[in-house]
Amino acid sequence: MDHEQRTIMLDVFRYLPEQEEQPRFQSYTVPYREDWVVLDALNHIKDQVDGTLSYRWSCRMGVCGSCGMMVNGEPKLTCAAFLKDYYPNTIRVEPLTNFPVIRDLIINLSRPHYQSGRFSSQVKRTQDVDDSQGDESGFGR
Ligand code: FES
């Protein structure tokens, strides 16, 4: 029997604006599972490899929009972007463009940016973001 564990590599945007002059990419190798989405891979990194990685997510059902990131240059909900659609190639994960970066993959969703429509136009969502959740929904996962 073949018990070899398949893996996939993620190049993840890392940036602490208050400490670093330039962003950088950090490579992580994670287990490849057909039913995993990019958010599962990020959660694996956060839980098993590097607890300093910062990003947002909340509903994990393609509803809230908080997990929106650039995946290989395209805006995606990472809870709905399956690894199998990229395997075996490396997946590059970056913050959504046109938003200030707070830390790593966390962008500033302050009202002016939010209400400009840039956020919703980048990421296809199944319903509007619940404004009552504010900026902190799923913060730091
Ligand atoms: S966590 Fe992905 S849309 Fe809510």
Image (cartoon, rainbow, N blue to C red):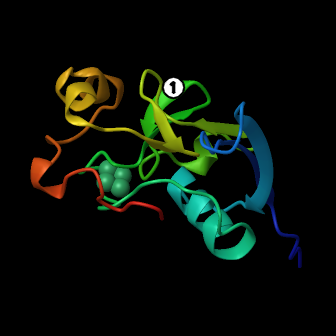
Locate residue 18: give its quadrant. top right
Ligand 1 near label 1 (Cβ, under 8 Å)?
no
Disc 1 packing (10 Å; few <14; some 14–19; many ≥20): some
Q: Residue at x 31, y 38 (%)?
A: 109
Q: Position of residue 26 (x, y in %)?
A: 78, 46
Locate residue 125: give its quadrant. top left
Q: Position of residue 73 (x, y in %)?
A: 58, 24
**Would residue 70 be found to the left or right of residue 134 on screen?**
right
Does residue 31 appear anywhere in the picture? yes
* Residue corresponding to mark 1: 74
Is 31 above or below relative to 80?
below
Does residue 34 appear anywhere in the picture? no
Number of numbered tags placed on the structure image? 1
Locate residue 94: give its quadrant. top right
Q: Position of residue 84 (x, y in %)?
A: 62, 48
- For the N terminus, give its image quadrant: bottom right
**Would residue 78 be found to the left or right of residue 123 on screen?**
right
Q: Residue at x 21, y 22 (%)?
A: 117
Query: Quick one: 49 or 140, which is closer to the camera?
Result: 140
Is 87 above or below relative to 134?
above
**Would residue 93 be found to the left or right of residue 27 on screen?**
left
Q: Residue at x 80, y 57 (%)?
A: 29
Q: Position of residue 132 (x, y in %)?
A: 10, 54
Secondary structure beneath dot 1 equals strand
Q: Residue at x 42, y 54 (%)?
A: 56
**Would residue 113 be found to the left or right of residue 83 on screen?**
left
Query: Quick one: 31 or 92, which is closer to the camera?
Result: 92
Disc 1 residue type (three-letter): Glu
Query: Quick one: 62 or 115, which is closer to the camera?
Result: 115
